[in-house]
Amino acid sequence: MVDILTIFAALVLGYLLGSLNTAVIVGKIYGKDIRTQGSGNAGLTNTLRVLGKPAAVLVLAGDILKGIIACLIGLRLGVYVQSGAASDCISLLAAGAGALIGHNWPLYFGFKGGKGALTAVAVLFMFDWVMALLCLGLFVTIVALTRYVSLGTICAALFFVAISFIPVFDHTFYFHVFACLMALVIIFKHRENIQRLLARTESKLSF
């Protein structure tokens, strides 16, 4: 029987950790509220545009680190489920999902955060590094060709859902639910970007 209380604890701990929004914290160090600058998004791309490369590196490291730590907590709690030959650590999935939700709607910063792409990548690497590399490869290719970070993120999220159902990766039903949840959250947070992409007014990344 699945330990619901432990899974809930993993979700809450992941959320509290994810709520430490690195872009907001780094912005405050620089004396700015990143959520009122540039695009208003508390994430890596807007930090790079508004505060520059050193600040963006801090955000990159922070967002990845909190996703990894959240997953390590979930892994330590050790709630597993098995379906045939497939086995998944549900507490890891819950902690990872919590970190993503916390990043996007942080408890400590008025529930106004980023879009969760970096944290989502860190979580995915902790769970299935092969799938993570495939999604990252697609993201880099699309951004390199179009210079649209948002388009690369959205396509990678949809690709993640698609490949999660491929039998060779050997995951359970819970992982499929996790994949769909992560993709829905990321796409929902990018809804304004989607509108700008359709209107061809989305800002391009300058290399």
Image: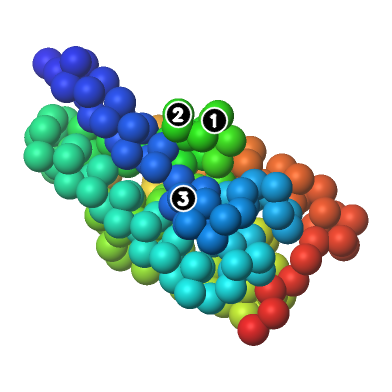
Nearest the eye: 66 or 173: 66
Question: Alpha-carbon distance for marks 1 and 3?
Answer: 14 Å
Say the numbered circle drawn on residue 136.
none
Badge 2 vs badge 1, beta-carbon distance below 8 Å: yes
What's the CA distance linking mark 2 and mark 1? 5 Å
Which kind of residue does numbered mark 1 sit on? Answer: Phe
Residue 96 visible? The answer is yes
The residue at which mark 2 appears reads as: 107
Q: Residue at left 39%, top 42%? A: 20
- As rendered, which of 192 and 37 lies closer to the eye? 37
Say what secondary structure mark 1 lies in. Answer: loop
Of tags 1 and 3, the one toward the viewer is 3
For label 1, the crowd category at 10 Å Cα-Cα, with few meaning under 14, some 14 to 19 and many 20 or more, is some
* 3D distance between C-alphas at marks 3 and 2: 13 Å
Give 74 or 17, whichever is nearer the viewer: 17
Q: Which corner quadrant holds the N terminus?
A: top left
Image coloring type: rainbow
Name the residue type under label 3: Ile
Mark drawn on residue 25: 3
Point out residue 139 in the picture as x, y percentages from the top left corner.
Answer: 54, 68
State left or right for residue 199 relative to residue 72: right
Q: Amino acid at mark 2?
A: Leu
User: Under tag 2, what secondary structure?
Assistant: helix
